[in-house]
Structure formats: structure tokens, C-alpha cells
Amino acid sequence: MIHDPTVQTLIPRLPAGVQLVDRPESLSAIHDPACAATIWTRQAAPSFQTWIDALAPETLPRARIILPPDQVRPALEQIFHETGRDETERARLIDDIAVLARLFAQTMQAHHLRLRLDVINTDACRRFHRDVIKARLVCTYRGTGTQLGTGIQGQDPDQIYTVPTPSPIVMRGTRWSETPHTGLLHRSPPIAGTGETRLVLVLDPIDDPQTEI
């Protein structure tokens, strides 16, 4: 795993409906009726963060695949074989994604996952929104994390909260309501013109892979 368990990262003044957890297994708190999102707060080991931040943007791994959770590791090993020269840190990243995929699949009882590794240097999804899915896991390994806020009557949030890198967040989409409704919205941080390049993992549960092709 890439995280340093000796360091705790906290997000102050969380929006309603967001739960912090200190263990990866506790991401299952997303099943609590009033939970709109749950965040495993962690901080990367310094050696890993130095490595991933130093990689040239064109060498960062990219992927868009649908596969069973137990096939994530071999698929990533094939995708990552040209990513960086430090095999130790590369193996840490593969291991971390494989573990998150397994945990998320167990949490959602999903037999397949849609896995994306996005390399972002523009204002992708900069509008606050909810995803039209049941649930989604997002983990930013490099760059600014996902931003959250409470939207009232369709308005953008007055206060914005940024998920720490590389803390995974599991969020409910519009196909899975929380009770009571919290109004939680999220977006990718606007980074156009800053020179920043983000590396973001996105996992979605898939019921029938044939309908997603």
C-alpha cells in the first residue's frame, strides 16, 4: 500500500453527509442511510509521492477498462510496464489500486468494475454535480483532490472542501439516494493554466458488462 499509517490527514468542517474513516474496510460506511460520501483519510509515503509527482506527464498510466476485480492486478501490470523506472514505487501503486478495487467491489457487491486512470491537466468536470450512477470511488494520486460542497436548491456550494491526496472517496450517485438528502455535490478542481497534472483513479460498479460495451 502507498499510504503512511503514521500520519493522519483530517478535513475540517466537513459537509453534511460525509463520513471520515481511518481504515479502508470502513469505506462500507457508504451503506449508512444518511451517508452521501465516505473518505478514508490517509497520506502517501513520502517516497511514493516524490516518485509519482516527478514522473513526466506523458509517462503517467492511462486506462479505461471493464473487468472483474480479480483481474485488476494483472491488467495493471501490463498497463504499467512502461511507467517510470522505479519498480518498487510502481508496484506500490499497482498494489494500492488492486486493493481499492477489491474493497470497492466487495462494498458494492459488484462482479465487474469500470476502471479509469485519467491524466488531467484541464478543467475536466469543473461544474458541481452528482454522477448518474449508483456509486463511485475516486482516488487522486497526483495533484489536487476532488472538491466537495453542499448545494442548496441547485446552487453551487458557498464553501468548498478538497479531499486530500491520496485519500479515496466513495460517493453515492443519483441512482442511490441517501436519507435525508444532503445536497452534497462534487467536482474536479479547476486547474487550467496552472501547469498541474493530476492522476486520478475512478472505479464504478458494473452489473452487466455486456450492456456497457
Image (cartoon, grey):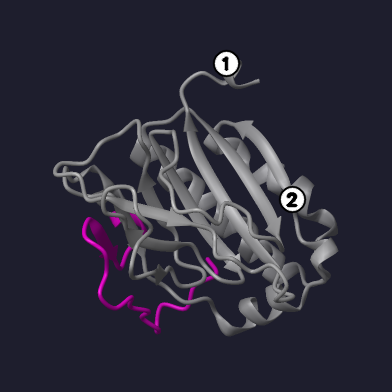
Question: Given the image, on which type of amino acid does mark 2 rest?
Answer: Arg
Q: Main secondary structure of the magenta part?
A: loop
Residue highlighted by disc 2: 62
- Residue 100 placed where, x, y %? 48, 52
What number of labels is visible?
A: 2
Relative height, residue 101 to residue 38 (above, below) = above
Q: Is residue 211 left or right of residue 153?
A: right
Bin the neighbour count of mark 1 within 10 Å (Cα to Cα): few under 14, some 14-19, many 20 and up. Answer: few
Q: Quadrant of residue 5?
A: bottom left
SS class, disc 2: loop
Bin the neighbour count of mark 2 within 10 Å (Cα to Cα): few under 14, some 14-19, many 20 and up. Answer: some
Q: Earlier in the sequence, mark 2 or mark 1?
A: 2
Residue highlighted by disc 1: 211
Q: Quadrant of residue 33?
A: top left
The quadrant the C terminus occupies is top right
SS class, disc 1: helix
